């Protein structure tokens, strides 16, 4: 399995378990791949999140913390917030965050374990 496929599986699982904050996705990558530099881990997290978004595996949501109302972002807005550096940082207690949730397509992908062909 390629590193991208492995990361897609890890990040998708986090999005299936719950609406994962972007910072939580980065934490997953940090814990699984400590041998990479911080910059490399951020870049990989961003690239895999973009891939999952573009292929319909996840959707992004704006969330009023602490874990309040979620509002789905359209694809164009979701693409833009992925590139915002501050969106990958843990929010203030009552701040706004960006969270990712798996779609039915993403859940099916995870169950099928066909990440190499997906990526």
Image (cartoon, rainbow, N blue to C red):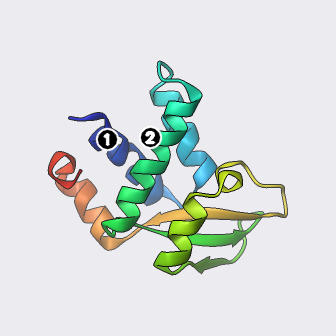
- The front one of 66 and 42 is 42
Q: Quadrant of residue 99?
A: bottom right
In this figure, which residue is indicated by the disc labeled 1? 4
Q: Decide: few, some or many residues near mark 1? Use Cα within 10 Å; few <14, some 14-19, many ≥20.
A: some
The alpha-carbon separation of the residues under discs 2 and 1 comes to 8 Å
Q: In this view, does 57 lie above or below 36?
A: below
Q: Quadrant of residue 20?
A: bottom right
In this picture, residue 83 sits left or right of residue 15: right
In this picture, residue 90 sits left or right of residue 94: left
Q: Which residue is drawn at 53% across and 47% down?
A: 25
Q: Decide: few, some or many residues near mark 2? Use Cα within 10 Å; few <14, some 14-19, many ≥20.
A: some
Q: Is residue 102 above or below residue 1?
A: below
Q: Residue at x 49, y 36 (%)?
A: 29
Earlier sequence position, callout 2 versus callout 1: 1
Q: Is residue 34 above or below residue 85?
A: above
Q: Residue at x 77, y 54 (%)?
A: 91
Percent across and percent down for residue 66 are: 77, 63
- The front one of 80 and 113 is 80
Q: Quadrant of residue 21?
A: bottom right
In this figure, which residue is indicated by the disc labeled 2? 44
């Amino acid at each position: 399995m390629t590193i991208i496929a492995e990361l897609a599986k890890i990040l998708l699982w986090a999005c299936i378990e719950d609406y994962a904050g972007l910072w939580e996705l980065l934490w997953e990558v940090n814990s699984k791949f400590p041998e990479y530099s911080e910059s490399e881990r951020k870049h990989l997290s961003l690239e895999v999140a973009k891939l999952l978004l573009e292929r319909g595996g996840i959707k992004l949501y704006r969330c009023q913390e602490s874990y309040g109302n979620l509002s789905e972002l359209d694809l164009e807005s979701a693409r833009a917030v992925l590139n915002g550096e501050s969106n990958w940082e843990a929010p203030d207690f009552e701040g706004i965050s960006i969270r990712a949730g798996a779609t039915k397509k993403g859940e099916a992908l995870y169950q099928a374990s066909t990440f190499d062909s997906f990526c």
